[in-house]
Amino acid sequence: MNNTWRILVVDDEVAMRESLAAWLREDGYVVDGAASGREAVEMARGAPYDIYFLDLKMPPGIGGIETMIEIRKLQPEATVVIITAYATVDTAINALKEGAQEYMVKPCNPEEISLFVKRTIEVKNLQRENQYLRQKLTRHYSFQDIVSKNAAMHAIFDLIKEVASQRSTVLIQGASGTGKELVARALHEAGGRASRPFVGVSCAALAETLLESELFGHEKGAFTGAVARKRGKFEVAGGGSIFLDEIGDISPKLQMDLLRVLQERRFFRLGGTEEIPMEARIIAATNRNLQEAVEKGDFREDLFYRLNVINIRLPSLCERREDIPLLVNHFIERLALEAGKPVRDVTKAALKLLMDHDWPGNVRELENTVERAIVTARGETLDVADFDFLMQSPRGGSKWNAPDGMSLAEIEKHAVESVLDRTGGNIKLASEILGVDRSTLYAMVRRHNIPR
Amino acid sequence: MLIGLLPVEGVAGADMDALESFVARHYECEVRRLPDLAMPADGYDTHRSQYDATALLKAALAVHPVETDRLLVVTDKDIFIPMLTFIFGQAQVDGPAALLSLARLRQEFYGMPARRELMLERARKEIVHELGHTFGLVHCADKQCAMALSINVTNIDIKRDALCGACARHLADRLEALAG
Ligand SMILES: [Zn+2]
Ligand SMILES: [Zn+2]
């Protein structure tokens, strides 16, 4: 079917525009009309077209060639046909030099235009098919939502499949941005709990007392502000999975409480006497080295062993560089759609650049990088220039002076406040800008009493 | 369903009779023959010595009765749209009206002896084609299907005056939706 291909006919003469559009619609294309070059550029910006028919002479405002140049800036791959009258054939030849694929002298033979459109669409179909095959390749290498052809990752996929239906606690360790939550979700989705809830809790996000009530729930009047009974995450998760992220950051008191839940598989709401069975599977994750924390006495050894029944250690992105092309394609496929941009591919040179880059923020940083490139990209293919921002040093060149009489803590507080302000309170984004973990940022917010 | 048949002045009554009975038979529906449409003042283009399809369709839509579901305008004149040297016909995809020219369906247009039966056979195919568009059908890759795009009479002569299986199913769905 042709109904996914879009054509824009641009002519100031309404009869010309409408009749050509109607004729092309009979072929099944989605065809719109624009009365001026400016309108055409605006429409192209809103939603790109695959083929543009532009009349060379369009008074007033910008003519066909200028319109083509503007559209090209937005969509380097767009097919542009310049329509001209006999008197202006020379200018039309000039249009080819400026990058038009074709010029047509009106009136033209139906055969000529019909063949041109057919061939153009055939080529575009082929490109689309290649893209589809690439997507298929991505799917071939993916497990749930995780894309990889790395051997260590595939061992993890196998382990996930093997243990997904068990009840044993899982501890996922990996640097920030390596995809710990994705693994937790895969564990949930691949097993017999998929139809039940998956409940995530970021342990670093909440103060101790809040986290307690968040996990276990509370009865009405359990503490000031407990105006009604509230079910905790353990209860909400039911027979599903509960994902305790940043488990390495919980307080000794909570470590103790959690240990008890794991041992007895039941708990009480805060201020409550009713015993509630714990049926959810616990999946814990941390970017800290928990063994080390145990040795230093920061983390309970008994809790560590209870959590660490099944251990999954996620490699950093640098340990699985071969996945970068797959991941980039995967992100383009998903994020271009979300961003409403026509980006479909990435050049080899840009891929090489990404493969050579160090990724301290791992897959998440790669994802953010691809997203940023897509949002600002002009064409259908991401190129080296679209990743220019990776090369720029994040700091400006001018010398920075600390305000007089301000302590480091105060500077930190101001920095966090201003970034949160800029991101509208979005912790995820703010933590990326500041280059710290979300848990660290939460801790700073708490430490400085920053209102959110 | 009611299909209106609107001849533009100059089409032979006998040709219209033949096409009318074909449309009624083909769609198994009521067909109403409307009085001849006078050629609109802006219908003739002196530079091109042809008739403007857009102007003709506009004039036809202005007089077509509201109760007709689809309107088929038939002319004996050679018609064009500004971008193209000529067209056999034009339809609004999913719209109320279609226009068909008999001029280039005639052998005599190409300097050959007249063959009325051949002209009517081509006209039947193009009627199924243009009305097909008004029911939402678009061009078909099956060269024998009436919905295949024709840019010359050779293309038309290869076609049948019926739809291929896929187009026929699509049309049946559309007609059903129209009735319901
Ligand atoms: Zn057609
Ligand atoms: Zn067909």
Image (spheres, coloured by chain):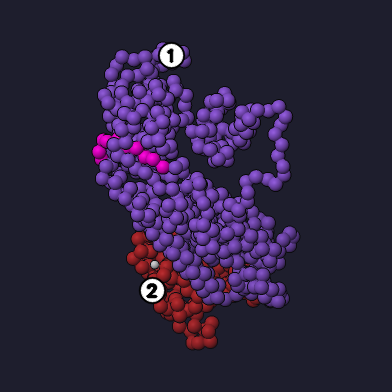
Chain colours: A purple, B red
Looking at the figure, which quarter contains the C terminus of chain A?
top right
Residue A342 screen position, x and y as percent: 53, 56
Q: Is residue B105 magenta?
A: no
Mark 2, secondary structure of its residue? loop
Residue A298 screen position, x and y as percent: 41, 28
Amino acid type, residue under disc 2 in the picture: Gln
Residue placed under numbered mark 2 in the picture: B144
- The residue at the point 50 percent across, 46 percent down is A360
Mark 1, secondary structure of its residue? loop
Up-down relation of residue A331 to residue B41 (above or below) = above
Up-down relation of residue A200 to residue A161 (above or below) = above
Q: Nearer the viewer, residue A138 or A173?
A: A173
Residue B132 screen position, x and y as percent: 44, 63
The answer to which image quadrant residue A51 occupies is bottom right
What predominant SS class does the magenta segment belong to?
loop
Residue placed under numbered mark 1 in the picture: A223
Extreme bottom residue here?
B112
Give the chain of mark 1.
A
The answer to which image quadrant residue A98 occupies is bottom right
Give the chain of mark 2.
B
Extreme right residue here?
A60
- The residue at the point 61 percent across, 69 percent down is A81
Extreme front residue here?
A295
Q: CA distance from mark 2 to mark 1?
A: 81 Å
- The residue at the point 62 percent across, 62 percent down is A72
Q: Which region shows up in magenta? A: A165-174
- The residue at the point 29 percent across, 49 percent down is A158
Front label number (2 vs 1): 1
Q: Is residue A49 visible?
A: no
Amino acid type, residue under disc 1 in the picture: Phe
